[in-house]
Image: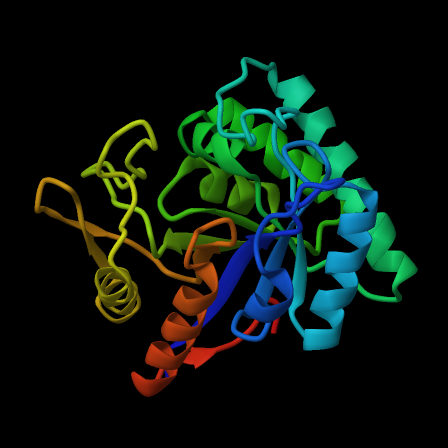
């Protein structure tokens, strides 16, 4: 039987600002990537989201990003590999504190936004992130873009990795995601997105914007919790995958 993890970025509210529908989405996913207070989130939100995930039996991951609340971590910031290492260690440690305080264990690390995309292309940044994860806890699973530098760096560092694919994003022929600055970056039609997901899992292929098929590996599928229809989308993907005979299971299980 085919098996896949379904993850969602969450815990992205902070202060009086509310984002997403984390509690309900957790009913349909198997892994939660929780913001660590830099691109979004705050200590109280981190604690609340960790506990919600535990109540639902969902695996918990740290979701470190650039220190850029205004840009939601989606703007490229020039940093040295050493600075990126420090950034990632700091944020993993912050979330892991709440995970340990709740008597649980951190499952994975998935960089956020621009940091994630830069690490998919930049070998030195990828190595810095992989080393940061390994140095904090070598049993953590590192999530990265399928076919990207981060997956390779994680494997070379001795980490277990999970190749990630995206349900609601279009792809370039290089295997990279289409930049959000492009008009066709997002897939707005839920049915089209679900069809893309099923094909990525069953055929290990995705159609690029040019119409060319690109080879892909799908260990885990991302749903963006900040999307306008994230809850209905999560439910639809969950139900469709089960109907297709695909088992949803946490990446660490």
Residue closest to the eye, 82 or 247: 247
Name the image quarter holding the C terminus.
bottom right
Q: Given the current orientation, which residue lies at the most extreme left position? A: 211
Residue closest to the eye, 136 or 33: 33
Q: Given the current orientation, which residue lies at the most extreme right position? A: 101
Q: Is any part of residue 160 visible from this angle?
A: no
Measuring from the top left, give residue 77's x and y in whole percent: 54, 17
Measuring from the top left, give residue 98's x and y in whole percent: 85, 53
Name the image quarter holding the N terminus.
bottom left
Above or below, 178 against 68 in this view is below
Whether residue 104 sits left or right of residue 207 in the image: it is right
Q: Residue at x 60, y 48 (%)?
A: 19
Q: Is any part of residue 243 visible from this angle?
A: yes
Measuring from the top left, give residue 126's x and y in whole percent: 53, 31
Q: Residue at x 61, y 14 (%)?
A: 80
Residue closest to the eye, 110 or 20: 20
Measuring from the top left, give residue 242's x and y in whole percent: 38, 83
Q: Quadrant of residue 112?
A: top right
Above or below, 166 against 88 in this view is below
Above or below, 113 against 5 in this view is above
Q: Quadrant of residue 145?
A: top left
Whether residue 203 sits left or right of residue 234 in the image: it is left
Number of on-image labels:
0
Q: Residue at x 15, y 42 (%)?
A: 209
């Amino acid at each position: 039987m085919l098996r896949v993890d379904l993850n969602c970025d969450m815990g992205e509210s902070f202060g009086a600002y509310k984002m997403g529908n984390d509690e309900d989405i957790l009913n349909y996913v198997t892994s939660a990537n929780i913001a660590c207070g830099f691109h979004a989130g705050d200590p109280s939100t981190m604690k609340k989201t960790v506990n919600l995930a535990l109540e639902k039996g969902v695996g918990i991951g740290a979701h470190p990003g650039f220190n850029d609340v205004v840009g939601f971590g989606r703007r490229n910031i020039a940093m040295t590999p050493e600075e990126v290492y420090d950034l990632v260690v700091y944020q993993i440690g912050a979330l892991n504190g709440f995970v340990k305080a709740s008597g649980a264990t951190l499952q994975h690390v998935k960089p956020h936004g621009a940091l994630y995309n830069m690490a998919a292309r930049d070998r030195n940044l990828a190595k810095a992130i992989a080393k940061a994860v390994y140095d904090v806890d070598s049993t953590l699973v590192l999530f990265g873009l399928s076919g990207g530098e981060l997956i390779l760096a994680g494997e070379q560092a001795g980490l277990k990795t999970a190749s990630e694919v995206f349900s609601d994003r279009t792809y370039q022929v290089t295997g990279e995601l289409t930049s959000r600055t492009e008009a066709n970056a997002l897939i707005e039609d839920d049915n089209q997105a679900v069809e893309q997901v099923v094909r990525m899992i069953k055929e290990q292929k995705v159609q690029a914007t040019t119409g060319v098929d690109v080879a892909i590996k799908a260990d885990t599928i991302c749903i963006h919790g900040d999307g306008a229809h994230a809850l209905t989308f999560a439910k639809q993907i969950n139900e469709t995958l089960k109907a297709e005979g695909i088992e949803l299971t946490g990446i660490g299980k």
